[in-house]
Image (cartoon, grey):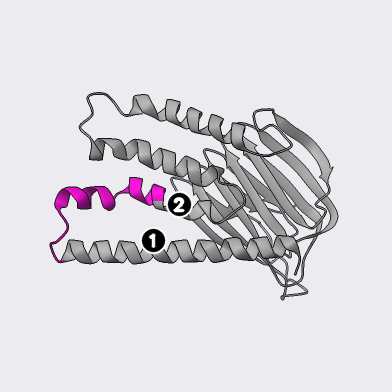
């Protein structure tokens, strides 16, 4: 097994375990709530959209090579849950942008990437060499536009935080079997341009956003064993799939 496949399998296994733990904990808390053992004040905090963001963020930390989306979700949920936990004398929105900017700054300083996320990387359909067949793209306050030429596409991940990405895969070939592409957007968007005969299954979680397959025409796939699964989350953002 190749190193990238091993890393991907380990990440998927960790994500499964963490998701299972969170679901079990949520079940116990719901049981305590329904039997009257959970105080209303605590129930009001635990069963809220803020805790949902924090939970998705925790799972995201174990689901991809990048911890940026998960960290941002935890920060957003943490900021908005403060008024439920503490009696604050100021508007929590005054904390939102400073905390988000500080968190993104820390991530940029600690991230071991050869490119600088703050630098605009808008590329006008430059050819992209995937090497091992996996696409890895990070856009933070920036954008990317690229075309994958005559290569086997096996999946990968795209993370956009306050940024966007457009990837043209019309000249690529989908690898045999099931390939997975993880997409996470927070206040950002992703556009995938794919061949009309690709089999695609969406497993996206959307909060105040959406991700849709907008191909106007889908051809019959000559090889139904090849399929691309697109999973991840869109928070205050979105994405679309289209073909020429």
Numbered range of the magenta stretch: 35-54
Q: Is residue 142 above or below residue 20?
A: above
Q: Which residue is mark 1?
A: 22
Q: Nearer the viewer, residue 177 or 213?
A: 177
Most extreme residue toward the left is 36
CA separation in Å, label 1 and label 2: 9 Å
Inspect the magenta stretch and tell me whether residue 136 lies in it. no
Above or below, comparing residue 115 to residue 239 in the picture: above
* Frontmost residue, 11 versus 221: 11
Badge 2 crowding class, 10 Å Cα cut-off, few under 14, some 14 to 19, many 20 or more, is: many
Whether residue 236 is visible, yes or no, is no
The quadrant holding residue 89 is top left
**Image position, residue 170 (x, y; %):** 79, 54
Q: Residues within 10 Å of mark 1 (few under 14, many from 20)?
A: some
User: Can the viewer see residue 156 in this picture?
Assistant: yes
Q: Is residue 69 above or below residue 33?
A: above
Secondary element type, mark 2: helix
| Image quarter (top left, top right, bottom left or bottom right) of the N terminus | bottom right
The quadrant where residue 134 appears: bottom right
Predominant SS of the magenta segment: helix
Residue 107 coordinates in the image, percent (x, y): 56, 36
Contact between marks 1 and 2 (CB within 8 A): the answer is: yes
Residue positioned 24% across, 40% down in the render: 85
Residue tagged 2: 58
Identify the residue at horizontal 43%, vertical 30% (top origin): 99
């Amino acid at each position: 097994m190749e190193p990238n496949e091993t890393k991907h399998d380990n990440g998927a296994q960790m994500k499964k375990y963490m998701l299972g733990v969170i679901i079990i904990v949520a079940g116990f808390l719901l049981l305590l709530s329904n039997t009257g053992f959970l105080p209303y004040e605590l129930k009001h905090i635990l069963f809220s959209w803020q805790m949902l963001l924090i939970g998705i963020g925790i799972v995201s930390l174990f689901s991809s090579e990048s911890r940026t989306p998960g960290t941002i979700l935890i920060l957003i949920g943490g900021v908005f849950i403060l008024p439920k936990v503490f009696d604050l004398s100021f508007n929590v929105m005054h904390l939102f942008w400073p905390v988000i900017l500080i968190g993104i700054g820390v991530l940029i300083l600690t991230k071991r990437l050869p490119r600088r996320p703050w630098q605009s990387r808008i590329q006008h359909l430059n050819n992209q060499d995937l090497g091992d067949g996996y696409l890895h793209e990070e856009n933070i306050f920036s954008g990317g536009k690229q075309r994958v030429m005559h290569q086997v596409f096996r999946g990968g991940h795209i993370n956009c935080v306050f940024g966007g990405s457009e990837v043209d895969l019309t000249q690529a070939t989908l690898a045999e079997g099931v390939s997975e592409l993880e997409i996470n957007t927070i206040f950002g968007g992703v556009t995938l341009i794919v061949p009309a005969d690709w089999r695609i299954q969406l497993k996206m979680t959307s909060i105040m956003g959406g991700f849709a397959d907008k191909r106007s025409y889908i051809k019959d796939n000559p090889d139904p064993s090849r399929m691309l699964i697109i999973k991840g989350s869109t928070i205050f953002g979105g994405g679309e799939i289209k073909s020429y």
